[in-house]
Amino acid sequence: MCRNSLAMKNWALITGGSAGIGYELAKLFAADHFNLVLVARNEARLKQVAEELRAKHGIAVKLLARDLSVAGAPAQIFEELRDAQVSVLVNNAGFGWHGSFVEDNLQRSLDMMHVNMDSLVALTHLFAQPMLARREGRILNVASTAAFQPGPTAAIYFATKAFVYSFSCALAEELAGTGVTVTALCPGSTRTEFHERARMQRFSNKMPMMDADVVAETGYCGFMKGKRVVIPGVVNKLTAALGKGLPERATSSVVRKLYKD
């Protein structure tokens, strides 16, 4: 376990904290004596997670059942937490979809952009300001190895993750020396509910998968060390390097074949 260097009175805000990588990160922060704010749409699942972490670690847990595809949700979250000293922001919420961009429902694509990008930017902008005033804070944005190449038949998802990666790296440089760090966590295929919900099961069956707890622990340790980019797993590091090094036409072709039904 990589230890918490921040005061125990501080709060960690985790979006998408009720399942998958977000849930595993919540467990790590709780074990490290952070109080938690968990944000997700599923209130029943949030309550289950909160009860588990309160009982096991004796921490305080606030629950906010919010839909981050709604434009005003980040501002509402910030207002509700004005009295809490949020020292860690984890932008983990997101979703994907496999299908033809032109044939798919446009609203789903727009909602994906709102959740994966807009809410992440808004929450980062809002919570980074008090962090900067205290000269202390950490921001973890969950991107993906999808950030490193185009994704035919999952075009919007791949594009949103490329945005998260680029935005995080740029902001990390902007905030260098301020006491606030920014980390982009770029997992590859991970055993969560994501692939089933996104209709990407065929892709996941063709790629080696990591367990969510391993991804979370690798990300958590890199995050606590102030690393700007964390890519869990040797295969994922290789995939990222190839994605960045090969021509986009070649990587696009590979991705399309992997996603082919």
Image: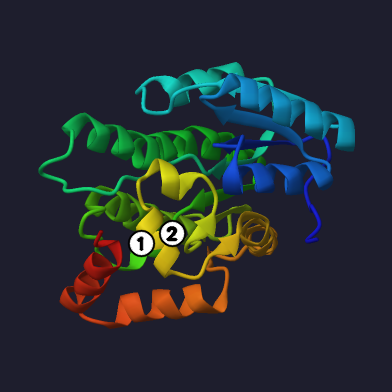
Tell me the SS state at disc 1. helix
Pointer 1 residue: 147
Quadrant of the rendered structure where residue 60 is?
top right
* Rendered location of residue 124, percent (x, y): 48, 40
Mark 2 neighbour density, 10 Å: few (under 14) some (14–19) many (20 or more): many
Estimate the spatial distance between the alpha carbons at disc 2 and disc 1, rounded to whole Å. Answer: 6 Å
Percent x, y of residue 10? 76, 36
Question: In front here: 140 or 10?
Answer: 140
Q: Quadrant of the C terminus?
A: bottom left
The answer to whether mark 2 and mark 1 are in CB contact below 8 A is yes
Which residue sits at x=59%, y=66%? 227
Q: Residue farthest to the front?
A: 261
* 54 sits to left or right of 133: right
Q: The residue under label 2 is which amino acid type?
A: Ser
Residue at x 80% of width, y 34% of height = 53
Q: Residue at x 55, y 24 (%)?
A: 42
Indicate the secondary structure of the residue bearing disc 2.
Answer: loop
- Visible residue check, residue 58: no
- The 10 Å Cα crowd at callout 1, few under 14, some 14 to 19, many 20 or more, is many
Q: Amino acid at mark 1?
A: Ala
Residue on which disc 2 sits: 144
Q: Residue at x 53, y 40 (%)?
A: 128
